[in-house]
Image (cartoon, grey):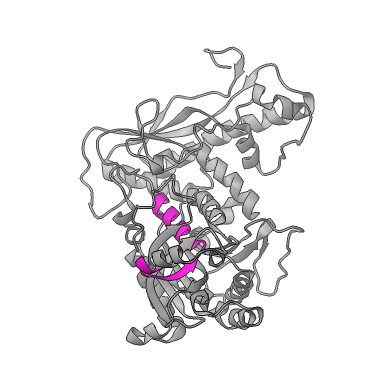
Amino acid sequence: MTGADQHVESPESPEYEEFADAGDAVERLVHLYQASAGFLRSRFDDAVANGMPRRRMRACYPELRLTTKIYATKDTRLSFGHVIEPGRYSTTITRPELFRNYLVQQIGLLIEHHKVPVQVGVSTMPIPVHFAVASGGSLQMPKGGIVEKSLRDVFDVPELATINDDIVNGHGFTYEDGSHPLAPFTAQRIDYSLARLSHYMATDADHFQSYVLFTNYQFYVDEFEAFARKMLADQDSGYTSFVGPGNFEITSADAPLDRPANLPQMPAFHLKRPGGAGITLVNIGVGPSNAKTATDHIAVLRPHAWLMLGHCAGLRNSQQLGDFVLAHGYLREDHVLDDDLPVWMPIPALAEIQVALEDAVADVTRYEGYDLKQIMRTGTVATIDNRNWELRDQSGPVQRLSQSRAIALDMESATIAANGFRFRVPYGTLLCVSDKPLHGELKLPGMASDFYKTQVAQHLLVGIRAMERLREMPLERIHSRKLRSFEETAFL
């Protein structure tokens, strides 16, 4: 019970402690989070069984702080692991066990670069009971009755004021206590996305890997599972298991993979390696809204790269069905990110990603150098939000496509790239031409079936090979300064 409000019951809130070792700091964060979340789960379970208590129940997220009074002498090539100027910095932390490796790495860099300890304690940001219950894994929120009617009166619930992207979108952001953010997301924002990932993709967050492929066709999922089984059959592959929707997991090549009765909206599949270094494939379906939803939530897991592998309309007469398109620029007519990232904002190609994709195409297809131009074209990809744009007056769209030098048209790629830019997640796009509407080659059923059979396996393998190249790259190279703004958080 707090001294300030005798009508609020809370767990004990110990004083902040200093830590000069990242591992010890994370252990303290785990302990504090478990105490807070466990308190809420216990009180919620009791409320379900015995009715609502008369007092409000509250527990808060743990918090990490850093105070530095001097400018650090740092390696200016690094884009993360240090704060930009002296001051007070902080971030609330959720699910520290899930993010253990990430936290140890990021906190360790802070201590190393600034030569000062970090402080760990309990913040004043309440944990919404929904998120505490979800983190336990075994409890379910009731769907009716007294608890639903009275929940807000007794427990803290999610607050939109703290579930936002003000840090990643803004400039000059500070918390109410005057401290600057250490990390790109608040704890409530992360918890919100973890809940959405489970809802939309039907796998727990701990299965997601650091290298994410997006597609919008079931054909790619089938090929991904086939590839995964080959890797599980190879003891030297480094891959340890394959997980599908419903958290069904297999560890051997010939094991059956169960399926949930109903697939989620955007099913996710995970080919796992130790340390989260494997590959996740998400079938996001069609359209920029799904692309934004998926990347909005996966971003909190801080992946090292995400790539779009999809089909597109080829816009040049010289292109052939099955040709690859490597995006080096984007025309954004998807409209779903206009309020977060103005359309005039350049979304640059990232050299590390581009080289990995081009090398992977050469490796898989055996075309090299100038010959690679026979099957792959590099240029601007246009993303629109109207699948049937051909049914309207085409003069406007076609003129814009020509002015932008676009070579391909789809409904997801620019959205995924723009959100990668916004969230500082390295991004790229490799598409495959499946039709040419401006030149009378439409995607007819028979043509499409033959195309899918011959091209999907090769296209997916290119994406996988690109990710494997990126995995071998040092983090300081792939997370380069190109995605960092004037005022950046120390954490990736």
What range is drawn magenta here? 402-422
Measuring 49% from the left and 75% from the top, which residue is drawn there? 438
Is residue 370 in view? yes
Is residue 203 in view? no
Left or right of 389, for residue 175: left
Q: Is residue 22 above or below residue 255?
A: above
Q: Nearer the viewer, residue 312 or 171?
A: 312
Q: Is residue 378 above or below residue 163?
A: below
**x and y, in percent, of residue 38 in the image:** 62, 33
Q: Is residue 66 magenta?
A: no
Left or right of 241, for residue 465: left
The N terminus is located in which quarter? Answer: top right
**x and y, in percent, of residue 266 in the image:** 62, 58
Measuring 52% from the left and 13% from the top, which residue is drawn there? 4
Q: Is residue 420 magenta?
A: yes
Badge count: 0
**x and y, in percent, of residue 92 in the image:** 46, 35
Residue 182 falls in image quadrant: top left
Measuring 35% from the left and 52% from the top, which residue is drawn there? 344
**x and y, in percent, of residue 334 in the image:** 48, 56
Q: Nearer the viewer, residue 96 or 52?
A: 52
Measuring 66% from the left and 82% from the top, which residue is drawn there? 446
